[in-house]
Structure formats: structure tokens, C-alpha cells
Image (cartoon, rainbow, N blue to C red):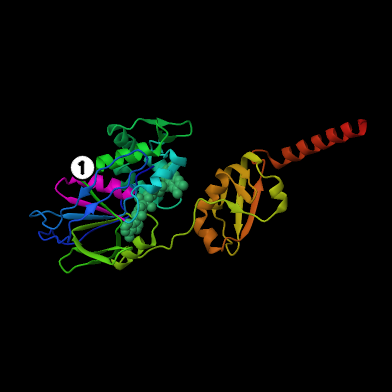
Amino acid sequence: MNLLPQRFIFRFGFASQTSTFKGNYPCSIPSHGRRKFSATTLSLATPKSGEELLLVVGGGAAGIYGAIRAKTLAPNLKVVVIEKARPLSKVKISGGGRCNVTNGHCPDNKILAEQYPRGHKEFKGSFFHTHGPMDTMSWFSDHGVVLKIEEDGRVFPASDSSSTIIDCLMSEAKRSGVLLQTGKVVTSASSTADGKFAIKLEKRSLDYVEHVEADYLLIASGSSKQGYNLATQLGHSILEPVPSLFTFKIDDLKLAELSGVTFPKVKAKLQLEGIQKKIPQLTQVGPMLVTHWGLSGPVVLRLSAWGARYLSSSNYKGTLCVDFTPDLPIEDLKSALTRHKSQFLVIHSMT
Ligand SMILES: Cc1cc2nc3c(=O)[nH]c(=O)nc-3n(C[C@H](O)[C@H](O)[C@H](O)COP(=O)(O)OP(=O)(O)OC[C@H]3O[C@@H](n4cnc5c(N)ncnc54)[C@H](O)[C@@H]3O)c2cc1C
């Protein structure tokens, strides 16, 4: 997993001496598998003089890693992660339970950035330069995780278990002094006149509301709509997200009969309704798999990722043209077929 840093980090005005985090609540941390974690108590009612607070919304990979990083760079900062459910729950299921940590075959950050359908311009800049895949690998190695690089470049913990990654992140969070509160939802955020963040926390099951003032706010809420709402409340505009990395459902009984057949290399081209111009991203080359509901495999996943916005704007309607012999010139293919046909006819006429 390439640990992407925060989605938004806000810093308004100057440092505060008067953080008012009301409450002193115990924090319960659910254990993943065999991991045991003792409860940490937040003691924010009486902030130390000059102490600043970073509030992190979301205890996923981005939030926990961002919190650790902030605490490492600024040890005097109070860092509190608010997680409404279980921390790192997506990491648990990532990579089929093994957690694909990053890419180990692409040390060139520029080339790597080009593999991202969206955001590659930003990745090309300071993003990967500040923290690229090699930094991710070094970080985990330095924190006791033995990694392995598979033939295709994917990096996994040698244990083949995502729990190794979770344990590492959770124990480093604890060691560095990151505080975690689960079961609370950040429901609103606004900026105050003195350049801080007024944040409202709620517990869904109880009639419970808590108001917090933070110096910094890191929204690391994944694809949660709530997170987008928080950013909107603070004046950001959100590009409507669209699905990506999906397989194609194609209603064709002939395809269903071929379910399970794989093609090592095809050239697939999408012609979408309402999109006339030639878009290079809508043509992809790679392996394809026929499933009982349509088509899948790397070539289809790539089309869905690179064509995500075009697919959405065409309402997912169009034509898919597949060249099953992309490396064979059409004339060579014709003569191969003719040869095959005459051979087939001869055999038949002899029997
Ligand atoms: C099946 C599957 C397999 C995957 N495999 C891989 C893989 O092998 N390698 C890889 O790199 N990526 C993989 N991914 C993608 C990867 O899991 C995600 O990109 C990554 O976990 C996103 O991390 P995040 O911290 O940004 O968001 P999330 O993991 O979604 O974390 C956001 C957290 O914020 C919390 N939250 C949201 N709103 C609020 C709020 N208002 N208040 C409090 N808490 C809130 C949520 O409960 C959640 O825990 C996989 C994803 C899936 C679904």
C-alpha cells in the first residue's frame, strides 16, 4: 500500500495557547486478530501551555500514517485520531488479506506517477519526491516489517498477512504518542475567527455531542461522503467521484458460454456514446478474461480506470471492440486463417 498523505491539511493563523478539547474520555481500540492493545486515555481537558492540537479525521491507512508522521516531525504536537468505526479495517482486507504495500519495481517516481489515471501531475511533483515507494519500503523495514517483492513488482509483508502491517502501524502510533478515539464521528468543521478549527464530534448511538477546537485538521476519511462534506464546509470544492477499477457487465449469451476463457494479450477499444473524439486512454492492451457476466482481467480494469470519467459521462453505454491478435498484421492473420481453413477442409474430405 502506498501510503498517501492527507487529503487536506489546513493551517490557519497562528499557534494557539488555548485548545479547548472538552472531555477526558477513554479510548477503546478493537484488536485485529491476535493483536492486543491497551486503552489510551485522552487527557485534553487541561492542555499544556503552548500545546497545539492536530485532529485527524479517520483512522485508515492515511490517517494513522499521517498521524505518526506528524508526531515524528513535531513531537510536541498533540495528535488525536478520531475514527468512527474500526481503525485500519480496509488495510485488513487489502491485497486479499496480504496487503500489497507498494510497488518495488519502479524506483523512477516520474514513470510511476504516469501509471495513475488521475492525480499523476501532482504525484510527479513533490508528492513521490517527499515519500515514494522506496520510502514506504524503508519505513516498514526500519520498523521491523520484513517485506518481499514478487515477480510483478508487488510488495507484501513476508508474513503474507495484512495484520503485520496493521500491528506495525498501531504499535508505532502508540509508541510515538498518537491518541486514538473510536466510535466518534466528526460531523462538522468550520474555521474560527482566530484561525483555528471548530469541530463537532458525535456518537451515533448516544445523545452525545463534543465540541473541539484544533489548530490543525487532517481530513483522511477515505471515500466517505462525510469527509467530503467537511471539506465543503471549509470552502473546498469536490470533484464528484466516479467508479473506477471495475469489470464490464455485457448481456450476451455467447459470452456466458465462454466463461473462464482467458486471452493473454488483446487490444480493447471503447467507443462510448456521445464521445466522438479519439481518446488514447480508451484503448488498452493486456490479458482479458471472460466471466459469466461479461469481461474482466487487467485490460478491462485498466479501461475502467483510465476511462472512468468518460464511462460515467456516457452513462456506461458504448461498444467494446476487441482485437484478439494485436501483434499480427491483418494480412498475416488472413493467410493464417486461409491456411487453417484449407487444412481443415482437406482433413474433412479425407474422413
Ligand atoms: C478489497 C480491497 C483491497 C484492496 N487492496 C489494496 C492493496 O492490496 N494495496 C493498496 O495499496 N490498496 C488496496 N486497496 C485500497 C486501500 O485499501 C485504500 O486505498 C486505503 O485503505 C485507503 O485508505 P484511507 O485511509 O484513505 O481510507 P479508509 O481506509 O477508507 O479510511 C478512512 C477512515 O475514516 C473513517 N471515517 C470516515 N469519515 C469519518 C468521520 N466523519 N468521522 C470519523 N471517522 C471517519 C472511516 O471509518 C475509515 O476507517 C484495497 C481496497 C479494497 C476495498
Give the quadrant of residue 251.
bottom right
Give the left or right position of residue 317, taking residue 177 as reference.
right
Q: Residue at x 47, y 59 (%)?
A: 242
Q: Nearer the viewer, residue 246 or 160?
A: 160
Looking at the figure, which quarter contains the N terminus? top left
Q: Residue at x 78, y 38 (%)?
A: 337
Q: Residue at x 30, y 50 (%)?
A: 63
Q: Residue furthest right?
A: 350
Relative to 277, residue 289 above or below: above
Q: Nearer the viewer, residue 295 or 79?
A: 79
Number of marks: 1
Q: Which residues make up the magenta segment?
A: 62-83
Q: Nearer the viewer, residue 256 or 340?
A: 256
How far across and down, in percent of the image, does residue 215 sit?
Answer: 18, 58
- Is any part of residue 262 visible from this angle? yes
How far across and down, in percent of the image, does residue 169 sit?
Answer: 30, 41
Looking at the figure, which quarter contains the C terminus? top right
Secondary structure under badge 1? Answer: helix
Q: Amino acid at mark 1?
A: Ser
Is residue 162 highlighted in magenta?
no
How far across and down, in percent of the image, does residue 318 sit?
Answer: 62, 59
Give the quadrant of residue 240.
bottom left
Q: Residue furthest bottom?
A: 193
Give the left or right position of residue 71, taking residue 240 as reference.
left
Residue annotated with mark 1: 176
Relative to 147, residue 122 above or below: below
How far across and down, in percent of the image, does residue 188 sit?
Answer: 28, 66
Q: Residues within 10 Å of mark 1 (few under 14, many from 20)?
A: some
Is residue 74 highlighted in magenta?
yes
Q: Residue furthest front?
A: 206
